[in-house]
Image: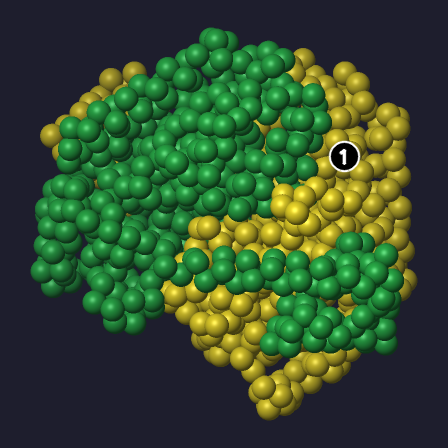
Chain colours: A yellow, B green
Amino acid sequence: MDISRIHFTDEDLTALEPKMEKAFAAMKALEGGAIANPDEKRMVGHYWLRASELAPTPELRTAIENNLAEIKAFASAVHQGQIHGERGPFKNLLLIGIGGSALGPQFVSAALGHPLRDKMEIFFFDNTDPDGMDKTLARIITQLGETLVLVISKSGGTKETRNGMLEAKAAFTAAGLNFSKHAVAITGLGSELDKLALKDGWIKRFPMWDWVGGRTSELSVVGLLPAALQGFDIQLLINGAAECDRLTRVADVKKNPSALLAAAWFLVGNGKGAKDMVVLPYNDRLELFSRYLQQLIMESLGKEKDLDGKVVNQGLAVYGNKGSTDQHAYIQQLREGIDNFFVIFLEVLNLRQPDDFQVESGTTSSDYLHGFFLGTRSALSENNRQSVSLTINRVDGSTVGALIALFERSVGLYAQLVNVNAYHQPGVEAGKKAAEGILTLQRKVMAFLDERPGQNLTCDQISSGIGAHDNFEGVFKICNRLGAAGRLRLIPGRTEFERKYGVE
Amino acid sequence: MDISRIHFTDEDLTALEPKMEKAFAAMKALEGGAIANPDEKRMVGHYWLRASELAPTPELRTAIENNLAEIKAFASAVHQGQIHGERGPFKNLLLIGIGGSALGPQFVSAALGHPLRDKMEIFFFDNTDPDGMDKTLARIITQLGETLVLVISKSGGTKETRNGMLEAKAAFTAAGLNFSKHAVAITGLGSELDKLALKDGWIKRFPMWDWVGGRTSELSVVGLLPAALQGFDIQLLINGAAECDRLTRVADVKKNPSALLAAAWFLVGNGKGAKDMVVLPYNDRLELFSRYLQQLIMESLGKEKDLDGKVVNQGLAVYGNKGSTDQHAYIQQLREGIDNFFVIFLEVLNLRQPDDFQVESGTTSSDYLHGFFLGTRSALSENNRQSVSLTINRVDGSTVGALIALFERSVGLYAQLVNVNAYHQPGVEAGKKAAEGILTLQRKVMAFLDERPGQNLTCDQISSGIGAHDNFEGVFKICNRLGAAGRLRLIPGRTEFERKYGVE
């Protein structure tokens, strides 16, 4: 880690020390099994996943170790064909999950995968868009009998994932296949999904623990099972993370990369997230790292209240894709425009072995990529734009595990510096509840029209009829969409508000 | 377009009117052929591409029309097998380009493509990462004889693209194929790339005009040729853009969606880009729209100086992927955290036809997606987070063309509101020059060591030896990478600075 392009001094670090001491102590307590997520009264145990000897009870330690052994055994049985689909060995993997159940596996698959070497090819349902699911299914529709489906939802009640599972099941059924013989559940013990998988006799159920948060679950079964199935060495991921954990436990800012990174965030953004974090890795494999970090960082740090209940509206916005590609998109703004960001550069020393194809005498494509990294960093520095550079030898299981661990701990430490709970997400329920309200409203609209076949009614009449005066807009949006999609009869009007809707 | 969740009043719009009048006038002059890019003394003509009758001279009009006819004829000849690869009809398309030569084709391919319907499958080299190119090549390595390569570079000198072309050519040669019989150039007349394609007898050369900027080239041959080759109806793209152009030429803010959007940007961000723009489309097909917009908006608006030479450090940061997926990543921060953003929601009314697969009684996957869009919008509004919602009937050529045109004109108008040149990119050269400096330094390091075979030298000794005291860091970074990659012998030292490097 090179922080030479961050504008802070030894004095700045010294001034942070009292806060940092508290952060180190809190992290130590967390790793020791404290209730580090006070709202949800939960332990925060993702660090134990890669160092089971640190788990606070022998039972947890055994559970972690047995789980890992089961993952390896399951992947091995799939690779050897002992566990197989109805029409042959499993060659495809369809992962159904969203947020913390998809972003890690997507990042790691892009980082470690290779089309000619992977043992299985992975596909994702990571949304409840039927069109998106249709497009993904189209790629494997003739091979469903050789496709293993992983359904991942910690709560077991995530609607996008439930819908994806039902859509996949329908496709299997339409192909004359028994979905249950192709499905694996990863979910909390006793969840709706767990019960379904048990009842229907799915191939296997893997447990998710309440002390592992979704956004820190990549090194749990959520990330390790798909990685193992694709043929990646998951022990490398675990060991890389464990090694980084050891390096970042040191209670000395200058010797602890996670603490230095957290300090950089604090000092650059004034402890308020005043600057966005732009993630520019110089290896295509890391293109999805920014998306992974969006969740890890923004969901952890973007909080209304601090741990004392004071309104602080914290956060740290993250975006970026890859260099040098993004240089051709927005380096213009980064160099000359609004200075509302800092960059995390990721330098990768080994891109191809042997690196001997010359595009000019003595110069390779990777020399250019490296030149663009250093050139861009200089050009930004010249204009006082700040950056941190991380260097890794190559993208492999070990460095990917280390990167995950590095940022996990930076997030944990930074959250302490700004005094927020990094492990809850109280703000996400509001949108889900409002969405349920819309679905309930849609059911009322449909029931109202179904009771009046042949009638054509305006949105005003419909919202009055169902007593939803207060949500005319919701009725309007629902009718507008169902009319456009042909699910309601639509009689045009002079304006959108005079349109009428009905059913046969 | 629904701007009800933007906090501005009629008075705010009225106050903007004088500026907006000037913006409308400037846009009219631009469309009339004025030198709208004063630095580069160029006309800005992307609007003529979809309304050739507006081109300022008959020659330009004819060129646009002939070009379009040639694109259609070429795609048709490929589809009919009259133009084919050495081992059969072209079934794959490898597009080599970066920035404006890749982001549009990537966006449109994701938006309009379907694995079972597309006439060709598209792959991209959009960087100079040899590892990334190797991974892409691995997917088509056995089918290169049926792969058409488009090399796209306006200047014809973009290094990433040149390198990609050389890497692809080497792969074709290794497969016993003549690259020239599979290659098409899209570049400025007389460029290095143009000369090479002519000399080597490539299949075809399509011209890029200096009055079309890279980031507004999607509706030129850059975007239209790959779209046509994939089997998309490019006339729909053109017509959709032309129709949106007509709607957004109206010199009345309240009746002009591009002007309203520009006004929203201005009022939300205080005319200084004070808030990031988060793009959340509710259809997986539009997942790459944010990346397309990153270039269109940030490269156009992110400027140091205004048109009067005053330092203004303008810009508008853009990020986002898709809803509801991103809700599970960072809606926590958007709802409760730092209020440094506004959202562009994209509502798509038709996702699947017929939309009849029910995940619950009467409820489909798309109902959930729509519910999450409305629910999230409400949840953000409740907490005073602002948003604009755009609604389209479905994602097709027509709406994609319209979306591109909508934002192009918003960018043009907003640039006038804040008085910057939207059509140049003076800041990108610095990074390229610095990168060339690094490559030159690397050549000096290698030459210095090559003259001293068998010797092992520290970076200090090397930088002194080549007279690069002022860039010790550059020498260090170069040696560090070449040592790690095995291209220099590396003798470990007690610290990184004591490492020695040499050649045989």
Q: Which residue is mark 1?
A: A118
Q: Is residue A64 visible?
A: yes
Q: Amino acid at mark 1?
A: Asp
Left or right for B73, reference B442: left
Quadrant where the image shows the N terminus of chain A: bottom right
Q: Is residue B347 visible?
A: no
Of A132 and A97, the residue lying toward us? A132
Residue B103, image x, y percentages: 45, 41
Residue A34, image x, y percentages: 74, 72
Residue A356, image x, y percentages: 74, 44
Residue that appears at 77% across and 16% down: A87
Residue A250, image x, y percentages: 78, 78
Q: Is residue A417 above or below residue A210?
A: below
For label 1, the SS is loop
Of A163 and A301, the residue lying toward us? A301
How would you rate the neighbour count of disc 1 (Cα within 10 Å): few for under 14, some for 14-19, many for 20 or more?
some
Q: Is residue B128 above or below residue A96?
A: below
How many numbered marks does the figure carry?
Answer: 1
Q: Chain of mark 1?
A: A
